[in-house]
Amino acid sequence: MQREETANSENGVWFVYDGECPICRYAAHALRIREAAGGLHLVNAREQAEHPLVTEVSAQGFDLDESMVLKYGGRFYRGAEALELMALLGTGAGWFNRMNALLFRFRPVARFCYPLMRAVRNLLLRLKRVDKLRNLSSQ
């Protein structure tokens, strides 16, 4: 896992997440990606709002308050699709990665679960009194 300040986002798996969200933060730091996929690069959109990939995500119109975003192989994946990709590219190392692979490699399960996970995320942020990212408001 790497934190990158500069983004050649064509290499490896890039995970843009909300660092204030406990679920997002845990997933970002627990996720292990197969070596064949390249390295895992984490971009905390709150701490790295000016990161080139956050800018690119916003330019694509992806609302980080509504979905996490992965970039892999030059393509963006968000929400349930990103969850499914995490499951497919993840290793079996640790309980998080095993559970992730078991549940979310199936598109219907990922699509069903993602809105529930997003609702829990939004609730946790409200309870913490954390403002939304509003990455699209600067566009």
Image: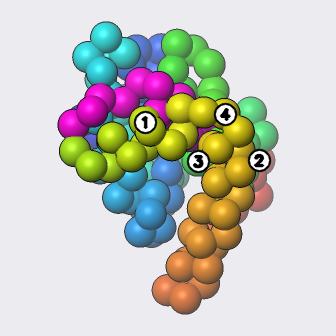
Q: Is residue 120 magenta?
A: no
Q: Earlier in the sequence, mark 2 or mark 1?
A: 1
Q: Nearer the viewer, mark 2 or mark 4?
A: 4
Task: Name which of mark 2 and mark 4 comes first in the sequence.
Answer: 4
Q: Is residue 51 above or below residue 76?
A: below
Residue type for callout 4: Arg
**x and y percentages locating residue 47 in the rendered image:** 41, 58
Q: What residue is pinned by disc 2?
A: 139
* Quarter in which the N terminus is drawn: top left
Q: Is residue 13 above or below residue 135?
A: above
Tell me the residue at 38%/59% (across/down): 25
- Residue 81 in view: yes
Residue 107 circle label: 4
Marks 2 and 4, how far apart at CA = 31 Å
Q: Label 3, label 4: how many angstroms apart (C-alpha)? A: 16 Å
Element type at mark 4: helix
The residue that appears at 55% across and 77% down in the rendered structure is: 125
Residue for badge 1? 101
Q: The disc labelled 1 sits on which kind of residue? A: Ala
Q: Nearer the viewer, mark 2 or mark 3?
A: 3
